[in-house]
Image (tube, grey):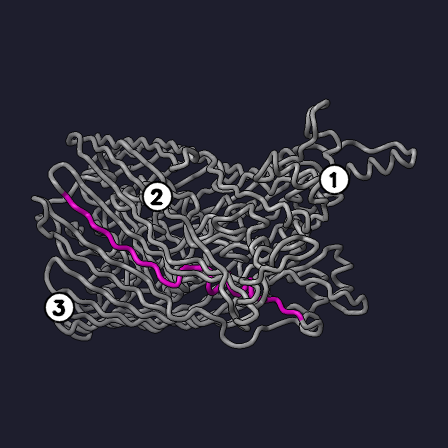
């Protein structure tokens, strides 16, 4: 007979959480409905599937910390993107929206425990989600890394999310160093819901509209099909700053009085359009299961998203670009510059087909998963200045000029695909011993797609040069992994889970890792838990093979072209850059759980992650000015003003504390109140030891890691983050009030004086949600995110030689050439002369958009 388990619910760090059943149960109410739960429906036990390959355990009995987030709590955030919703519900999960960073706008960087997006593994129903084709190459959090596009998953398709806050490479393989996010899909075989959403920022822009349908179809009494269709559109939200003419005149070598100030008097923002880009997304997801017999079923799920993001590059002012050669402005009208537009088109898909079965006392699961992500880039309202300058020279020389530059370009793109075969078995040997084992075969393929000729020749399209044909490539690799382990109930109180894993990659070698987890119930009120594990992360194909030229803002010098070379290139060999190898980690977690009564739970978890051979995308290495230097010769041969590359450049240490306090069923206002306090505090996040620099760079007294890159990795995320949530059920109303405290961050922007640092201050954001049950089948929701319109706020602080730093900040002496005080000069370096006053050019610890209003209507059927 097939075993079934009761649905169970528990209040955790994010509010009420619906448990997972090992197999889908008969029809249940649509979990997207924000209807309130009756006290008698709330139980203490939660069954989770993430964190061990052995038998499923309750949250209370699990030896590792797992957060459960249900659809109700995701919807209360008012966010239509899953990554943004998780950032508002999981303190150790952070995501940031950068103001302008080209392809970065397609997928905002996210991370768990300050470890970067590539060290968090994303699963869908327990199966690996494909990576994005994007690798972050700009100066933004996540630089040099890539992650899965979790924003591709429609929220209304999600039953709940299990977030494992622990290293899990032994169970799941590469990338699971900082944690695992397991997205469990809806499985209700009947009913569904239609949800309409609308929103706008407090400034009246960034208008959002979305429509989502979720529907379950019963397949007789043998299974189900559950599908979700989601379409959404978010408008542009502009947050451009007032430009300082003195800084622009200095950066671009322009005449302040004649050229710069007259233009800025007419266009104070210098024509800039930065903030949150226009986004359109169409998503489809289906989840299904068919029971062939009581001991054999087939399951499948598939998802597809098509997304387009329209953003803008820095505006090309007339004193920066003196002419557009008559291509971008109408004849007879004055030339006022131009603003290149960047368009990113994304296609992401994943699908799994598998079977679960029982043979004797063994439970088996065999599956095949495919997935892919393709990104294509276009540049509009721009031109290839090299082509046009060549025409001007040809005409001046009396020669026949070549063709004109186009004003729109197909700049190429990237594509990533994988195929994963999983086979897993487990057996309950005795009441106290469960054994498990499995294998994974994976093939990955990464393509760089060349842009059209005009997008890359002669310097390329202004603002975003296309991929060169010589940088286009198709690379692949295979890996094989096998794992095994056992869970032991040594006593009724003491549980031990031991796992080992071996991986073999076709391109860089092998990895062997293990994990020991344990839990001891001192009493019904007190539980101790801990884990010790080793982990690894294989260098991604993106990191091994990406090579490109790109436009970047160079502080004090405007926009310049820099090169990113891969480790297979002539330049890398000349610099003696070693081939990439896998990162290795050591993880320790120690936890305490308290359950004073049936309505109260408290958990406290300490973690420590030691990462060896951390892969980074190094800083741009510039020539020394000495033509005899080997470094200068290599850069001159490459035809770029600077060069960067990937390297296993350093070791790091990261430690902190996660805490969760939950109290539910508190009588209040003739209703029931739940109080949840959860947070993350970083104790240490820093480089460990010296930097591994290639010989030519060390000889030139330069380094792949500078203060800016180090700050991106270690101090640009909140020092601490705490969420205090109040959730009140009263009659047909549900009121939710959440306060999120974002702790301070520290940054060292490029060009900033070595005796100064940028510090974003601690800020508290308040979110309010009201749900009203209009009828048994209809719920109206209203959200105000960032109720008090709090914006990021930063200040400059002295460091190193604090006396010199203080002199810079306090001096009133103005530079005779620029007319700026030392402090004003430093501020202009940070904000690109005021273009990005709220979050700076490189981003901040939370959104710059301020207050946002959202409303939704959910109709269940």
Q: CA distance from mark 3 to mark 1?
A: 71 Å
Q: Residue at coordinates 44% horizontally, 51% vertically from top-left?
A: 96
Q: Which mark is residue 385?
A: 1
Residue numbers of the magenta segment: 702-729
Residue 720 forms part of the magenta stretch: yes
Residue 339 forms part of the magenta stretch: no
Upstream in sequence: badge 3 or badge 1: 1
Secondary structure at badge 3 equals loop
Q: Is 584 on the left-hand or right-hand side of 649?
A: left
Furthest-right residue in view? 398
Between 746 and 521, the residue placed more toward the observer is 746
Q: Which residue is mark 2?
A: 300
* Residue 752 visible in the picture: yes
Q: Residue at coordinates 43% horizontally, 39% vertically from top-left?
A: 304
Q: Which residue is mark 3?
A: 525
Furthest-front residue in view? 812
Quarter of the image for residue 115 reads: bottom left
Secondary structure at badge 1 equals helix
């Amino acid at each position: 007979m097939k075993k079934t388990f009761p649905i169970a619910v528990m209040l955790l760090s994010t509010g009420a959480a619906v448990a997972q059943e090992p197999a889908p149960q008969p029809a249940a109410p649509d979990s997207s409905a924000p209807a309130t739960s009756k006290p008698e429906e709330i139980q203490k036990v939660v069954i989770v599937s993430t964190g061990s390959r052995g038998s499923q355990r309750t949250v209370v009995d699990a030896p590792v910390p797992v957060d459960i987030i249900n659809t109700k709590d995701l919807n209360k955030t008012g966010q239509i993107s899953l990554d943004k919703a998780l950032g508002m519900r999981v303190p150790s999960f952070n995501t940031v929206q950068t103001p302008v960073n080209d392809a970065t706008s397609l997928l905002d960087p996210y991370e768990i425990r300050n470890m970067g997006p590539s060290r968090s593994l994303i699963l869908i129903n327990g199966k690996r989600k494909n990576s994005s084709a994007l690798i972050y190459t700009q100066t933004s959090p996540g630089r040099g890394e890539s992650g899965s596009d979790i924003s591709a998953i429609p929220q209304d398709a999600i039953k709940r999310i299990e977030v494992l806050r622990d290293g899990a490479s032994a169970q799941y393989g590469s990338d699971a160093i900082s944690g695992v996010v397991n997205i469990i899909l809806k499985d209700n075989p009947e009913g569904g819901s239609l949800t309409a959403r609308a929103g706008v920022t407090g400034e009246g822009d960034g208008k959002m509209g979305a429509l989502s349908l979720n529907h379950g179809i019963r397949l007789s009494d043998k299974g189900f099909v559950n599908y979700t269709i989601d379409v959404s559109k978010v408008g542009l939200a502009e947050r451009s700053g007032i430009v300082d003419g003195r800084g622009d005149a200095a950066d671009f070598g322009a005449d302040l009085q004649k050229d710069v100030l007259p233009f800025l008097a007419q266009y104070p923002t210098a024509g800039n359009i930065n903030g949150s880009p226009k986004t359109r997304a169409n998503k489809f997801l289906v989840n299904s299961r068919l029971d062939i017999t009581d001991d054999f079923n087939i399951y499948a799920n598939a998802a597809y998203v098509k997304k387009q993001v329209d953003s803008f590059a820095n505006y090309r002012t007339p004193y920066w670009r003196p002419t557009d050669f008559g291509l971008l402005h109408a004849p007879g009208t004055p030339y006022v510059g131009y603003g290149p537009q960047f368009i990113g088109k994304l296609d992401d898909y994943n699908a799994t087909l598998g079977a679960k079965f029982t043979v004797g006392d063994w439970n088996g699961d065999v599956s095949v998963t495919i997935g892919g992500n393709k990104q294509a880039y276009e540049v509009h309202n721009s031109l290839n200045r090299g082509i046009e300058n060549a025409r001007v020279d040809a005409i001046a020389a009396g020669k026949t000029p070549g063709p004109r530059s186009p004003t729109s370009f197909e700049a190429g793109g990237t594509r990533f695909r994988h195929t994963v075969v999983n086979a897993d078995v487990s057996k309950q040997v005795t009441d106290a011993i469960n054994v498990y084992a499995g294998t994974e075969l994976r093939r990955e393929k990464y393509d760089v797609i060349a842009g059209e000729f005009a997008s890359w020749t002669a310097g390329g399209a202004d603002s975003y040069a296309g991929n060169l044909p010589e940088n286009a490539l198709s690379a692949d690799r295979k890996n094989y992994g096998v794992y095994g382990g056992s869970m032991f109930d040594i006593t009724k109180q003491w549980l031990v889970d031991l796992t080992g894993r071996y991986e073999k990659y076709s391109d860089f070698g092998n990895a062997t890792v293990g994990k020991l987890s344990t839990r001891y119930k001192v009493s019904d009120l007190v539980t101790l838990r801990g884990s010790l594990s080793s982990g690894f992360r294989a260098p991604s194909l993106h990191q091994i093979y990406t090579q490109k030229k790109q436009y970047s803002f160079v502080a004090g010098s405007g926009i310049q072209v820099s090169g990113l070379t891969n480790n297979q290139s002539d330049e890398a060999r000349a610099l003696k850059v070693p081939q990439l190898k896998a990162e290795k980690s050591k993880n320790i977690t120690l936890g305490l759980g308290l359950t004073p009564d049936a309505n109260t739970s408290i958990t406290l978890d300490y973690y420590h992650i030691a990462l060896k051979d951390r892969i980074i995308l190094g800083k741009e290495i510039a020539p020394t000015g000495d033509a005899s230097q080997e470094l200068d010769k290599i850069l001159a041969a490459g035809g770029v003003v600077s060069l960067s590359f990937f390297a296993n450049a350093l070791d790091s240490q990261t430690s902190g504390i996660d805490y969760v306090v939950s109290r539910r069923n508190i009588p209040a206002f003739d209703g029931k109140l739940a109080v949840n306090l959860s947070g993350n505090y970083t104790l240490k996040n820093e480089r460990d030891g010296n930097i591994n620099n290639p010989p030519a760079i060390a000889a030139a007294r330069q380094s792949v890691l500078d203060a800016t890159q180090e700050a991106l990795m270690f101090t640009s995320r909140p020092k601490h983050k705490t969420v205090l949530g109040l959730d009140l059920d009263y009659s047909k109303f549900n009121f939710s009030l959440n306060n999120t405290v974002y702790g301070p961050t520290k940054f060292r922007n490029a060009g900033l004086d070595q005796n100064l640092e940028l510090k974003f201050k601690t800020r508290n954001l308040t979110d309010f949600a009201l749900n009203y049950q209009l009828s048994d089948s209809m719920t109206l929701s209203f959200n105000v995110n960032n109720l008090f319109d709090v914006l990021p706020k930063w200040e400059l602080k002295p460091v190193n030689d604090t006396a010199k730093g203080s002199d810079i900040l306090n001096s009133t002496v103005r530079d005779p050439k620029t007319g700026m005080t030392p402090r004003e000069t430093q501020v202009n370096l940070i904000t690109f002369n005021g273009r990005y006053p709220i979050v700076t050019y490189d981003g901040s610890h939370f959104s710059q958009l301020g207050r946002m209003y959202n409303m939704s209507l959910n109709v269940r059927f």
